[in-house]
Amino acid sequence: YRAVLDSGVWKQSHSSSQRVQHLSPSAAIWRRATLSRDYEGFLSCLLLPEEARRSSLALRAFNVELAQVKDSVSQKTIGLMRMQFWKTAIEEIYKDDPPNQPVSTELWRAVKTHCLTKRWLTRIVTEREKDMDDRAYRNLQELEKYSENTQSSLLYLLLECLGVKNVHADHAASHIGKAQGIVTCLRAAPYHSSRRKVYLPMDICMLHGASQEDFIRGSREKNVRDVVYDIASQAHVHLEHARSFSHNVPAAATPAFIQTVVLEDYLQRIRKADFDVFHKSLLNRNPLLPFQLYLRSWKKTY
């Protein structure tokens, strides 16, 4: 245990603010932003091989930039303009002429270093742009498609950073990405409800007779918990399916999937809370997460 604290991600995560001071000012800015807005993703990047770490952090920063657009703009038009910036930026990155913007510059470096596939980057932006419509998912399949085009695409890029080209790894990434997207939707439900917005799949809400107003009020009634149970169960199904053929996935790919620790942790905690998505225990950060991530990394499993 002492060895983990001395050499593992625990020490790395607690010294991250000191380490970014040695970076260029622009790099320090976007790495601090990634740490504050995607803490779990930041920790996961620290456990990647050194040759892939910087590029993976750039991809996480890119994802954070896109993810925060929807909640940070007051008008859809402004959000669409920012999405267009990133569409143009990607085109310019692949022409070796990236915009003078910290994340774009690092993303260009990652593309050059690992020959990242343009299609995955473009697909993430396009799907985030569609999501600017600001409406609930019609059904679970629509949420899964969104998750595949965003979270799974990010995992495909992380696999490329690791130099992994394997159909089984891609298959696992597809399911883990879908699980990630579903869990993210659940985790964000209390925040969205506080802003009088509900994005949970409408078909499951209708199935259990739960209205959007129930979630906005923070209801803990059985029908609301049944909705959460069904959605969380689907995330669990994707996670278990990805693990069912883990013996066919190359060991080199497992660092890209280390965030399954985070998904598993949330699904266990919401089960203990009897699928009450508003339970206060779900708002607390798991203090053992860095240790659990390091342990999973050491085992080379997901």
Image: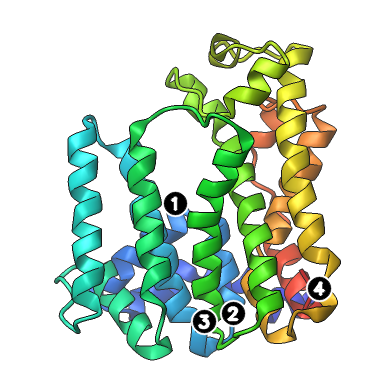
Q: Which mark is residue 17?
A: none
In the rendered image, residue 139, in percent from the top left (x then y), is placed at 59, 31
- First-in-chain label (3 vs 1): 1
Q: Residues within 10 Å of mark 2 (few under 14, many from 20)?
A: many
For the residues carrying marks 3 and 1, which lies nearer the camera in this image?
3
Q: Amino acid at mark 4?
A: Ser
Q: Which mark is residue 37?
A: 1
Q: Are marks 3 and 2 in contact (CB under 8 Å)?
A: no
Q: Amino acid at mark 1?
A: Arg
Q: Measure the C-alpha gap from mark 4 to mark 3.
A: 18 Å
Residue located at (32% from left, 74% from top): 107
Can you identify the residue that label 2 sits on? 48
- First-in-chain label (1 vs 2): 1
Q: Residues within 10 Å of mark 4 (few under 14, many from 20)?
A: some
Q: Are marks 1 and 4 in contact (CB under 8 Å)?
A: no
Would residue 149 be seen by someone viewing this image from the given angle? Answer: yes
